[in-house]
Amino acid sequence: QVQLVESGGGLVQAGGSLRLSCAASGRTFSIYGMGWFRQAPGKEREFVAGISWSGGRAYYADSMKGRFTISRDNAKNRVYLQMNSLKPEDTAVYYCAAESFGAGDFGSWGQGTQVTVSS
């Protein structure tokens, strides 16, 4: 089992930036990839970005490309999401997730961190 704890959320004005952090613990050797998802009030959870744990290959939802950057620090067992040019529609709870080898999906989830973008 992998435990995940997010941090870095908060209130920011439109156009501003935030950097989210996710700390992984437990069976971190089993991590194949990690990702960020978000869920806005009244909406379904959506994929934001993902990154392979070993090679660092990053991939993004089309709407996030150019504004958000995912990165990881294997030595610290952390993954980050740098969010720039934030918009009010980016307001959501952001979740970190981990995919283990052979799992085929994101099976470990953090509790989320709130991001609120004011206009």
Image (tube, rainbow, N blue to C red):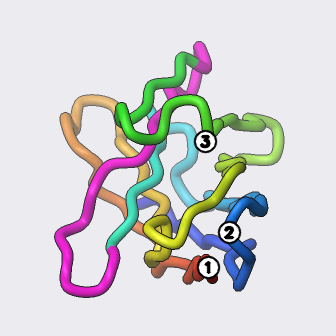
Q: Quadrant of residue 33?
A: top left
Marks 1/2: CA distance?
Answer: 5 Å
Which residue type carries mark 3?
Phe
Query: Which residue does the numbered mark 3 point to in the structure image?
Result: 68
Tag 3 near tag 2, CB within 8 Å: no
Q: Does 91 lie within the magenta span?
A: no
Q: Which mark is residue 119?
A: 1
**Residues shaded magenta:** 40-56
Tag 1 near tag 2, CB within 8 Å: yes
CA neighbours of label 3 inside 10 A, class few (<14), some (14 to 19), many (20+): many
Q: Is residue 66 visible?
A: yes
Name the residue: 25% across, 66% down. 45
In the rendered view, would you say 24 is above or below 40?
above
Quarter of the image for the N terminus: give it: bottom left
Query: Which residue does the numbered mark 2 point to in the structure image?
Result: 14
In the rendered view, would you say 44 is above or below 118?
above
Name the residue: 55% across, 83% down. 114
